[in-house]
Image (spheres, coloured by chain):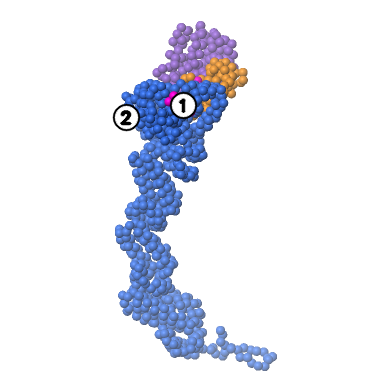
Chain colours: A blue, B purple, C orange
Amino acid sequence: MDRTRTRARAAPPRKMRIRAYERKPAAPPQLFSNAWERFLRPAVDAVHQSQPVPHSLELLYGHVHDIVLHRNAPALYDALRRACDRHIAARIAQLAALSPSSEHVFLAAVHAVWHTYCTHMLRIRQIFLYLDRTYIVHAAQPDARSFWDMGLLLFRTHFSSVATVQQNTVHCLLTLIDRDRDGQTVDVALMKNLLLMFTAIGTYDAAFEKPFLASTDTYYRNESRTLVASQDVPTFLKHAESRIHAESHRAVRVLDPSTRNPLISTVEKRLVSDHVVTLLDNGFSSMCDQHRKHDLKRCFAVLSRASDHMPADSRAPNELMKSRLIDYVKNVGRAIVMDKSKDPEMVQSLLTLKARLDDLVNFSFDGTEAFNMAVNFAFESFVNARENKPAELIAKFVDSILRTGNKGFSEEQLETTLDNALTLFRFIDGKDVFEAFYNKDLAKRLLYDKSASLDLEKSMISKLKHECGPQFTAKLEAMFRDVDASKDLMQSFKTHKLSKTSLSHGIDLNVYVLESARWPLSTQPSKVKLPQSLMDCQEVFKKFYLTKHSGRKLAWQYVNGSCRVKANFPEGTKFLELSLYQTIVMLLFNDADELSYSEIADATGIEELPLKRTMLSLACGKARVLLKRPKGPQVDAKDSFVFNKKFTHRQTKLKINAIQIKETVEENAATTERVFQERNYQIDAAVVRIMKTRRTLQHAGLLAEVFDQLRFHHKPADVKKRIESLIEREYLERDENNPQAYHYLA
Amino acid sequence: MNMGGPSSHRRKELTRVAQRRLTRELAEWSVKTPPVPGMSVSETDRVDEWLVTVTGAAGSVYENEQYILRFVFPADYPMEAPEVVFLQPTPRHPHVYSNGHICLNVLYDGWSPALTVTSVCLSIVSMLSSATKKGVPPDNDTYIRNCQGRSPKQTRWMFHDDHV
Amino acid sequence: MKLTINKVRLVAAWTWDAGDDACGICRNAFDGCCPDCNIPGDACPLVWGNCKHPFHLHCISKWIGAQSSEQQKCPMCRQDWKFEARK
């Protein structure tokens, strides 16, 4: 503001003239030193000593104003600066003299100095406000852009330069933080305020954060070293998790926000990354084994955090966990699959294992697809570690579900079990083995009316179709068609005049006519001799069938036939469900009471093994309609058999034909043999296909291409055998000069 | 005269049926037991082309003479007849033109899928045997001039003379 | 009579009845199927001509289908081809 005043003279309308001063106005001499020494310096000193200011603030403000107006601002600033400097220097010196042995006391003193200093400087600023606004802000001081700034700078200069003070402060802070980590109570607010001071004077990063991170590093390096060795893995993981949480909390409560990330990553590094492999080695598989879902979930969460800090040569923790999981599943699975004594429970055990692992992946590993795939990969690997048997057992398991007798389970439960069995099936390389056994079991279910539910059967077929394509199930579907068509056929037979013959014997005739290539049937012509009545029935049906389907022929499968026989025992009439073989044998006793084994063999034409089995079922089972002489649990060629006149049973209707449905060892072997035969064809076909396009190939090259084409497990020796066979059959020839090379011939 | 490749254009890949059938037929021609004594087959480097050596029947004017027949099988063999010609030197016979083309009903309109390489060879040997003396067909020169290297299957054959 | 049969269930497997022969067209045995099929039986039926010669339906149809109507002859005996009426 311009303080010169124009003098107004009365007497308008005279013209007004402004005359310049005759001499330039000047400040009173000693204006600055007078004002400073008498008024301002005492005021500054008083503030610094927390005493009342001796003059009114307005007066002081006016002096500052005058000094600045008379261009004495630089001198004033300088004087003020020196005055403040002296004061803070003295304060810091006092702190330097203070022992930091009691951290709280020391830190409280530092904080007191800082806090008072700030209060004083604010008051001083009020006095020198004019200087601050007009001079300090505008004069572009090299290190201070305001009075406040200047104050901070002065503080920092002394706080940092008197080496021990800042160092002691930091050291005390770090000690307190470590104590906090150790669980002792510390003054959080004090720490927070001191750290704000560091931030305010601009030494937070260099003076505090750096040593803080280093001390954190040391703290957790030491702690984790001890704990990893002494705690079990789940406890350690719990600890690590709570540590990370606590440090994160500390960052929010006490530290500058910028410290949070480096702090957490330091903690993660020292607590987790350094120990990933040890932790997995010591605890992973046992946690899986004990199904510790929550611990594993923690493990996954904690170890995943370590991903960013792994050493360059190490795999990511997730990858490590995945491969541990694979190893674990493989070990457990292999133990189930390879133990022959546990074959009967194998499938159920595998299903239980799979369900458990699915639950684990879902719950503990967030359902991560990579972990699902790891489990599947492991299953695929161990299920195929044992050739063929798992496929066979899965097929039998499915049979046990589809067969009658699963009372107490709802259709939905059975569906679910089928779905689960199908997931196992998916892992199997040798789907052909499954198919063969499924085929055989389905045949039995259909031929002996053992199927629990047609809906369930159809649903299983559609599942298989969906899984393996229509080719896989075409055969199975045709089997259902045959059974349906046979039922229709019998309807029309019963209204046909030819059926009178069978009726004349009083026999209700039913025939299943099957398409032979689609059913697992014996191809050998049977030498079994039917009793006349059955022979008549058979022939009349054949005649009927051929009028309907000329150009066909029928091969009778007596081994699969069955009868209901009315048996008049002296003690009562019984209706027996028998196999056809049992019937043929029993009917011989219409004309005799006792027959020797060889007489029976001659009369029936049944081969030794099935005949012995039949005799065993009739004479040594639960319901003995024949008596064996001599008694004993085995049938011998020298035995003879007597019609059991004393036979009694609480039921009127009873089944003795269970043996037909049970699988025999030979049947099992035959099924497996069929698969191998089919595989041989496939190997042959693959070899011929390859050689036809390649004309000439080395042995190894051929094996490699065959391997690519085949979908089941095979040994190179098997393929070699097939190659030999193809050479014999002149499809291939060996190179004359190089026995390792083959040429295509046909 | 160029008696090189068969005159039908580019050969199509044999169908699956044709391949299986030829594989089966070839198996009958096993080296150890040829279906007919004096005949032998050698495959060229392709499945759809065979060379068959036939021997003149005992008692005929071609006795012990060996000739080579070339069979080229069409993609849908046996629904279509193979192309069959004599390679040089051809037998001098009234139904065999000097370019190797054979005037024989079963090779053209008279083809039946029930015929095989064996039965065709037997027919040709029997045709040779029926000649009482050697000699080219009377229209040999005209035929060859008109035919200009085409496949015999493109000729419109008139079979007025089944017996020589 | 000690025992009488009330009810019997027999099982029979059917195959084509064409002797041990092979199909004259594809040369596959009649107890197998034509080269285009995988499983013998209903899916690859046999047919007979009036001349009693059997073929795979797929084989003879291909041949007959490719001939003009007056040229339709049995590949085996060259008689005019007529499907034998059967059920």
What's drawn in magenta, residue-wise? C1-18
Residue at the far bottom: name it: A11
A114 up-or-down from A482: above or below:
below
Residue A293 position within the rendered picture, expressed as x and y whole percent measured from the top left: 40, 54
The reply to whether the magenta stretch includes residue A406 is: no
Residue at the far front: name it: A571
* Residue A248 location, quadrant: bottom left
Provide the major secondary structure of the magenta segment.
strand
Quadrant of the rendering where the C terminus of chain B is positioned:
top right
Q: Is residue A640 left or right of residue B146?
A: left
Neighbours of disc 2 within 10 Å: few (<14), some (14-19), many (20+): few
> As shown in the figure, which amino acid type bears the numbered disc 2?
Lys
Neighbours of disc 1 within 10 Å: few (<14), some (14-19), many (20+): many
Chain holding disc 1: C
> As shown in the figure, which amino acid type bears the numbered disc 1?
Ile
Residue A318 position within the rendered picture, expressed as x and y whole percent measured from the top left: 40, 52
Residue A390 position within the rendered picture, expressed as x and y whole percent measured from the top left: 39, 39
Measured in 3D between alpha carbons, the distance from the residue under mark 1 to the one under mark 2, in whole angstroms, is 28 Å
> Which is more toward the observer, A438 or A321?
A438
> Which is more toward the observer, A133 or A344?
A344
Helix, strand or loop for disc 1? strand
Q: Residue at x 51, y 23 (%)?
A: A504
Residue A581, numbered label: none
- Residue matched to label 1: C5
Q: Is residue A126 left or right of residue A298?
A: right
Q: Residue at x 42, y 35 (%)?
A: A650
Residue A631, numbered label: 2
> Which is more toward the observer, B69 or A140?
B69
A84 up-or-down from A473: above or below:
below
